[in-house]
Amino acid sequence: MCQKIFSPKQLKNQLPLQEEQKQFINQSRWIIKNIISKKDSRFLVIVWPCSIHDIQQALEYAKRLKEISTKYPNLYVVMRTYFEKPRTTVWWKWLIQDPNLDCSNDIEKGLFLARNLLIEVAKMELPSASELLEPLQVEYYQDLVCYGAIWARTTESQVHREMASGLDFAVGFKNWTDGNVDVAINWILSSNLSHTFLSIDENWQVCKKTTQWNKYSHIILRWWANWPNYDSDFVKETFEKLNQAWISTWIIIDASHWNSGKKALNQIKVVENILEQKNKNVVWVMIESNINFWNQSFNPCKDKKEDLKYGISITDECISLAQTEQLLDKISKSMS
C-alpha cells in the first residue's frame, strides 16, 4: 500500500523560512565551515540527545542552551535536532517516523513538527544539526539545517554519498561500526566529487540531479573495534590518513556512544582527555545532553507516552543541562 502525502514545496509554503532566519542559517553554515577549515578559531560543540521525542522539551532545552552559549564567545554551540535514526533492529525510529510514540507512523505530522521546530530554533538564533538518514525526507527541511551528520550504519551507502555532495552545509561521517576509518575517508572523497543520480525535486517530481561537491565533508570518530578512539595516538593516525588522501578538513570526536561506553558521565572524562591533548587537529566535539540526567526505556507499541518523565532521553544516557554548562565552561577555559 502506498499513501500519497504533501510534497516538500507544499510543506515549505505552509511553514516558510523568513528572510531573517535564512540569513542566520547561511551565516551559521559559513561559521561552521570556517571552523572546520581552521579559518575560525572557535571550538565547535554539538549538544542534545541522539533523539527528539518531545517538541516542548526540545524548545525548552533550545531556549536554555541559547542563554548558556552566550557566556562563551570562544565556543560555537550547535543544538542536535535529530529526527531520524538508523536501527540495527526494529525499534522506535524517531520523531518523523512516529511522532505520536504509539506506532501509528504519522509521517506527515512528523515532517510538520520537524520543520516547525527547526524554524523556532532558528528564530532563537541557535544553529541546528541534523542526521541525514532518509534522502526523500531531507528535501522537506534541508534549507533549515546548519550542519549534517551521516551515522556509521549509512557511511558506506552510495546514496548518502551522492546526497551529501549536493548539500550546502558541512557534513560529518562517522567511522564504520567496527571502527574502520578508511570507509569514512572513502565517503569524504566521494562526497568531494560531483555526482549525477535519480532524485526528486520539491514538487515530488522524479528528476536527474547533478551536484557540485561538498568540500567540507569530514570524519567523526565514534570508537574503534571495542575500544575508544579519541586518544592522541588514534587521532594522530587518523589525521595522517586524511593527509595521505589529500583531505584538508579536521576531526570531530563523538564523546558519547561507545567512546564513553554508553555511560553519560564518561563523556566528561572523554572531553577532559581531548582538552589535555591540546590537539589542534580536533576542532569540535559531540555531547549527548538533555534537560535532566540519565535515560528511560520506552517501547512505543507497549508503553504509554503519558508515563514518560519530562526532560529525560528515551534512547542513550545523557548528562544534564547543568552538567553540560559546567563542561562548556571547562572547554572555554581550556582555550583561554
Image (cartoon, rainbow, N blue to C red):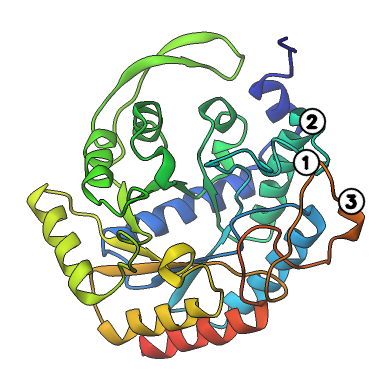
Residue 169 appears in the rendering: no
Q: Position of residue 142 (x, y in %)?
A: 54, 37
Q: Residue at x 44, y 46 (%)?
A: 151
Asked if marks 2 and 3 touch (Cβ < 8 Å), the reply is no
Mark 2 or mark 3, which has the lower sequence index?
2
Asked if marks 1 and 3 touch (Cβ < 8 Å), the reply is no
Q: Which mark is residue 99?
A: 1
Q: Quadrant of residue 225?
A: bottom left
Structural distance between the alpha carbons of marks 2 and 3: 17 Å
Q: Which residue is mark 3?
A: 304
Structural distance between the alpha carbons of marks 1 and 3: 13 Å
Q: Which residue is mark 2?
A: 106
Asked if marks 1 and 2 touch (Cβ < 8 Å), the reply is yes
Q: Kindly report which numbered mark, 1 or 3, lies closer to the viewer in this rendering.
A: 3
Is residue 228 depicted above or below 141 in this figure? below
Mark 1 or mark 2, which has the lower sequence index?
1
* Drawn side of residue 197 relative to residue 92, left or right: left
Q: Position of residue 57 (x, y in %)?
A: 78, 61
